[in-house]
Amino acid sequence: VALVTGASRGIGRACVEALHAQGATVAALDINPAITTAFTQKGILGQTCDVTSAEQLKAAIEATVRQFGGLDILVCNAGMFPSSQTIETMDAKAWSRSLELNLTSHQQLLQLAIPYLKLGVDPAVVIIASKNVPAPGPGAGAYSVAKAGLTQLARVAALELGQFGIRVNVMHPNAVFDTGIWTPEVLEKRAASYGISVDAYKKNNVLQVEITSKDVAALACAMVGPLFAKTTGAQVPIDGGNDRVI
């Protein structure tokens, strides 16, 4: 039994579909009410949930356990990328919102899920962090700091939960373009700033490959499966090779 946040599109939706395809029943959480009808497959429960609300998270977890009988897998994916702002010009609300959604909501989710994960079958947690943790960029302070805090939260969780057999691992995606924030207009603008085509921009990494939501979902499935059965506290990039990270 898996629970995925930010599940209506992009990486979250791909994780729901990949986990379900490999035999899991899945609770798919998203703030978008359309999540309740987004999946027609038997064994996927779409639930409207604002993950910044501890009350709504608690209700969603309890509904999942009632429906499927327990909780074994947690994929912490919900998040947002604030508009670019320097530290000097940082809007206080943008800073607080990023910390609330990209960090605090995950701590609340973990706290509420741990009692059920302790009773789970081969329990595992996957934290979707970011390339911005090992290689932050200027103007992305609110996002980078929150994702770095999220990674540190995962490391502490790995230390605390290992005694219960709960594995906690982190992945750092970068440039996953089939997600909501990457509109054709944004892609064209970013590619033009580098003086290259959109196709070249999508493959602007060491391996010269494009990273998709399905690629991230495949790694998430591996992390909760037997391949990572004896691994916890790991941070794995999925970025085609970023020269700054390397």
Image: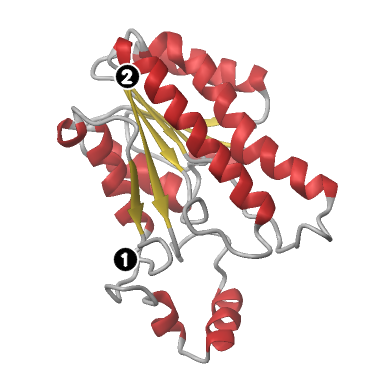
Separation (CA) of disc 2 from disc 1: 29 Å
- Element marked by disc 1: loop
- Report which quarter residue 58 is drawn in: top right
In primary-sequence order, the first of circles 2 and 1 is 2
User: Is residue 153 in view from this perspective?
Assistant: yes
The quadrant of the image that shows the N terminus is: top left
**Label 1 sits on residue:** 240
Horizontally, residue 187 falls left or right of residue 53, namely left
Q: Does 180 sit above or below residue 106?
A: below
Q: Hey, what amino acid is under mark 2?
A: Ile
The location of residue 79, given as percent across then percent down, is: 58, 44
Examine the rendering and report whether any part of residue 51 can be seen: no
Q: Is residue 213 above or below residue 155?
A: below
Tell which of 212 and 87 is nearer to you: 87
Mark 2 crowdedness (10 Å alpha carbons): few <14, some 14-19, many ≥20: many
| Left or right of 219, for residue 97 | right
Q: Position of residue 112 (x, y in %)?
A: 53, 15
Residue at the image point whose x is 57% and y is 79% from the top: 190
User: CB atoms at circles 2 and 1 under 8 Å apart?
Assistant: no
- Crowding at dot 1, Cα within 10 Å, few <14 / some 14-19 / many 20+, comes out as some
The quarter of the displayed image where residue 82 is located = bottom right
**Coordinates of residue 233 in the picture (x, y in percent):** 34, 32
Amino acid type of the residue that numbered disc 1 sits on in the rendered structure: Gly
Residue that label 2 marks: 166
Q: From this viewpoint, which residue is outermost toward the bottom?
A: 195
Identify the secondary structure beneath mark 2: loop
Residue drawn where x is 54% and y is 23% of the image: 109
